[in-house]
Amino acid sequence: MPRRRIGFWYRFAAVLCKPPLVILIKRDWRGTEHIPAEGGFITAVNHNSHLDPFAYAHYQYNTGRVPRFLAKSGLFGKGFVGAAMRGTGQIPVYRESTDALSAFRAAIEAVERGECVAFYPEGTLTRDPDGWPMTAKTGAARVALQTKCPVIPVAQWGVNELLPPYARKPDLLPRKTHHVLAGPPVDLSPFYDREMTPELLKEATDVIMAAVTRQLEEIRGEKAPDRLYDPRRERNEQRRRTQAQTSHGRSQARTGPKGENSK
C-alpha cells in the first residue's frame, strides 16, 4: 500500500521544531535502511526523556516515513490542539473502551492504510535507575499480531542527558548527541494465527522489548541487566521490605534493647 503524504500540519510542526533540535543536539543516526519504504509498519521505541519524542520524530521525519504517535482520544477534540493532532495524523487511543482490541482500532486502521505507528511500549518514561528499557504494555504486540505488519525495534540515547527523566531544567552544555539505532524487523511469525491470550501477548511483547534492548546495548556499548526492570515487581519488593522492617521494629520494641521481654 502506498504511503501517505506528510501533509501541511506535519511540515508546519517540523518548521517549528527542527531548528532548536539542530541547535541543541548533535546526531548519530543509524539503521534507517530498516525503515520500510512502503506499507504500514510499527516502530517500538524506548522512552527515557520528555524530549525524546521530538528528537525521535526528527530522526524518522528525515527518512520520509513520519511517525504517527498514539495519544489519548480526549486530545483530539475542538481547538488548536485537536486540529494539530488530527492534522499531523496522530493516533487516538480509546482507553474508555471495554474491548482491548477496540482501544487500538485507530492504530490498526492506520497500519492498514500504510502508516507508520510509533509505539512507546513502556507507556511512560523508564523507571530503570540506569535508563534501560523496562517491562512494557502489550498494545504494540496486539496491533502487530492483528495486522501482521513489520515491527522495527528502535533504541535512542542521549536526549536523556540533555533533559534527564523528571528533571525540571535541561543540561545544555556540553552539547549532547542523540544516538538512534533502528534494527531489522522483529520475527513475530511464531505468534501469528493463535488466540490472543494475555500470556501470548506478554510473550510477544517480551520478544519486542528484547530486540529494543539489544539495539540500546549496541549504542551504549554495554550489557543490559538480565531481566527488564518491572515497576510492579519493585513496588511489591519494596512493600515486603517495609513490612519486614516494621515487623523487626515491633519485635525489638517487645524484647527490649538487650533481648529481654519488656515488662
Image (tube, helix red, strand yellow):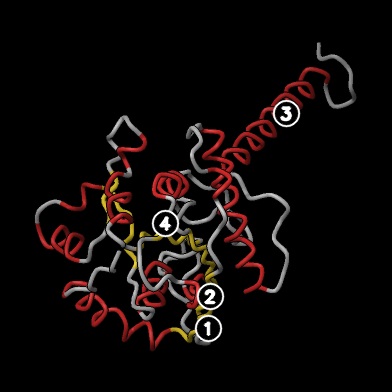
Q: Secondary structure at mark 4?
A: strand
Q: Which mark is residue 119?
A: 4
Give the residue type at disc 1: Asp
Q: Which mark is residue 154?
A: none
Q: Which mark is residue 244?
A: 3
Q: Nearer the viewer's eye, disc 3 or disc 4?
A: 4
Q: Nearer the viewer's eye, disc 2 or disc 4?
A: 4
Q: Quadrant of residue 253?
A: top right
User: Where's residue 3, x and y in %?
Assistant: 28, 69
Give the residue type at disc 4: Phe
* Quarter that holds the C terminus: top right
Q: Pointer 2 and pointer 3: residues touching (CB < 8 Å)?
A: no
Q: Pointer 1 and pointer 3: residues touching (CB < 8 Å)?
A: no
Q: Is residue 191 above or below residue 44?
A: above
The answer to which of marks 1 and 2 sits earlier in the sequence is: 1
Give the residue type at disc 2: Gly
* Quarter that holds the N terminus: bottom left
User: Where's residue 101, x and y in %?
Assistant: 35, 38
User: Where's residue 91, x and y in %?
Assistant: 27, 55
The answer to which of marks 2 and 3 sits earlier in the sequence is: 2
Q: Nearer the viewer's eye, disc 2 or disc 3?
A: 2
Cα distance in 3D space between marks 4 and 1:
21 Å
Cα distance in 3D space between marks 3 and 4:
39 Å
The residue under the point 69% across, 49% down is 227
Q: Seen in the image, is 181 located left or right of residue 2?
A: right
Name the foreground residue: 107 vs 130: 107
Give the residue type at disc 3: Ala
Query: Residue tagged by mark 2?
Result: 158
Name the foreground residue: 193 vs 10: 193
The answer to which of marks 1 and 3 sits earlier in the sequence is: 1
Label 2 Cα neighbours within 10 Å, binned few <14 / some 14-19 / many ≥20: many
